[in-house]
């Protein structure tokens, strides 16, 4: 839901160029933090989760038109740095497949990467009195909400027609009113994103919670990492999720 499915030429040049510059800066920091990463374990996991995210984002939940991201799953399992890199890989593939313009790839990576980073951070910040399922579920809900607010802010500062940011069936629901002023259009967009998005967030949070709980039961070492500096040099017993 926080992926902008818009063609090139909608956003002002200064905005999408800024998106690319910020994305490049964050990618540089992420790659620097991963210089001592255990590549044998993390690169295959990065590839698998990027593919899973790509497949999930190509599916649509009707009738709300919500696309699952599974970005928080990637963030929890990969960590914030690799999670952002996964977001970059996925958005690059989507842009090449025509699922959104090339020029919005930077902003889309920031949106999806922010979900992964926030989801990871919130999951490990929550008290361990909560079960794995509820930690993952709550982290997903909060991450998706915060990034959706970020998306609404991007639409607001772009001064673009907010209808362009909605899926085709969403535009049919609210209709086209080119004579309307920008403020009502933006408020309508915000209501659509937050109301329909809430249903999608609950679905995605439930799926994320179930996936993380299952992984914690069958492959708990996937959750045992320390921000991916060098995966548990002293052994799995020293790794605490």
Image (cartoon, rainbow, N blue to C red):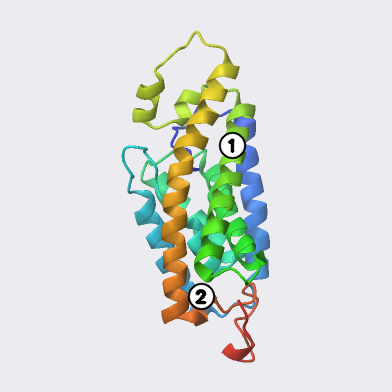
Please tell me whether mark 1 sits on a helix, a strand or a loop.
helix
Q: Nearer the viewer, residue 137 or 29?
A: 137
Indicate the position of residue 170 as horizontal and vertical percent values.
Answer: 38, 29
| Image quadrant where one finds the C terminus | bottom right
Indicate the position of residue 17 as horizontal and vertical percent values.
Answer: 62, 38
- Judging by the rendered image, the residue that carries numbered circle 1 is 16
In the rendered image, the vertical position of residue 71 relative to residue 108, given as above or below: below
| 130 horizontally vs 171: left or right | right
Residue found at x 66% / y 68% = 127
Mark 2 vs mark 1, CA separation in Å: 31 Å
Front position among marks 2 and 1: 2
Query: Where residue 42 is drawn, which disc sits there?
Result: 2
Q: As drawn, which residue projects farthest toward the front?
A: 129
Q: Nearer the viewer, residue 74 or 54?
A: 74
In the rendered image, the vertical position of residue 81 relative to residue 182, given as above or below: below
Indicate the position of residue 116 as horizontal and vertical percent values.
Answer: 56, 58
Please tell me whether mark 2 sits on a helix, a strand or a loop.
helix
| 13 horizontally vs 221: left or right | right
Query: Where residue 120 is drawn, which disc sits there?
Result: none
Residue found at x 43% / y 39% = 100
In the rendered image, the vertical position of residue 39 relative to residue 86, given as above or below: below
Residue found at x 63% / y 65% = 31
Query: Does residue 69 show up?
Result: no
Q: Nearer the viewer, residue 103 or 148?
A: 148
Residue found at x 61% / y 74% = 228
Occupied quadrant, residue 61: top left
Query: Does residue 181 show up?
Result: yes
Q: Nearer the viewer, residue 90 or 206?
A: 206
| 144 horizontally vs 100: left or right | right
Indicate the position of residue 128 as horizontal and vertical percent values.
Answer: 63, 72
Counting residues from the start of the chain, the first of labels 2 and 1 encountered is: 1
In the rendered image, the vertical position of residue 234 relative to residue 66, given as above or below: below
């Amino acid at each position: 839901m926080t992926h902008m499915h818009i063609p090139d030429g909608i956003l002002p040049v200064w905005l999408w160029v800024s998106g690319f510059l910020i994305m490049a800066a964050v990618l540089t920091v992420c790659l620097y933090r991963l210089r001592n990463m255990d590549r044998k374990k993390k690169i295959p996991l990065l590839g698998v989760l990027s593919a899973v995210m790509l497949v999930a984002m190509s599916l649509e939940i009707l009738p709300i038109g919500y696309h699952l991201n599974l970005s928080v799953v990637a963030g929890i399992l990969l960590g914030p740095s690799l999670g952002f890199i996964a977001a970059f890989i996925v958005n690059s593939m989507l842009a090449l497949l025509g699922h959104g313009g090339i020029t919005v790839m930077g902003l889309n990576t920031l949106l999806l990467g922010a979900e992964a980073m926030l989801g990871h951070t919130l999951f490990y910040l929550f008290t361990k009195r909560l079960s794995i399922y509820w930690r993952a579920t709550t982290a997903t809900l909060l991450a998706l909400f915060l990034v959706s607010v970020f998306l609404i802010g991007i639409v607001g500062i772009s001064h673009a027609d907010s209808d362009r940011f909605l899926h085709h069936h969403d535009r049919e629901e609210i209709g086209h009113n080119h004579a309307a002023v920008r403020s009502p259009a933006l408020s309508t967009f915000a209501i659509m994103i937050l109301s329909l998005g809430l249903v999608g967030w609950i679905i995605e949070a439930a799926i994320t919670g179930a996936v993380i709980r299952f992984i914690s039961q069958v492959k708990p070492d996937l959750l045992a990492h320390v921000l991916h500096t060098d995966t548990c040099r002293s052994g799995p017993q020293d790794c605490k999720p």
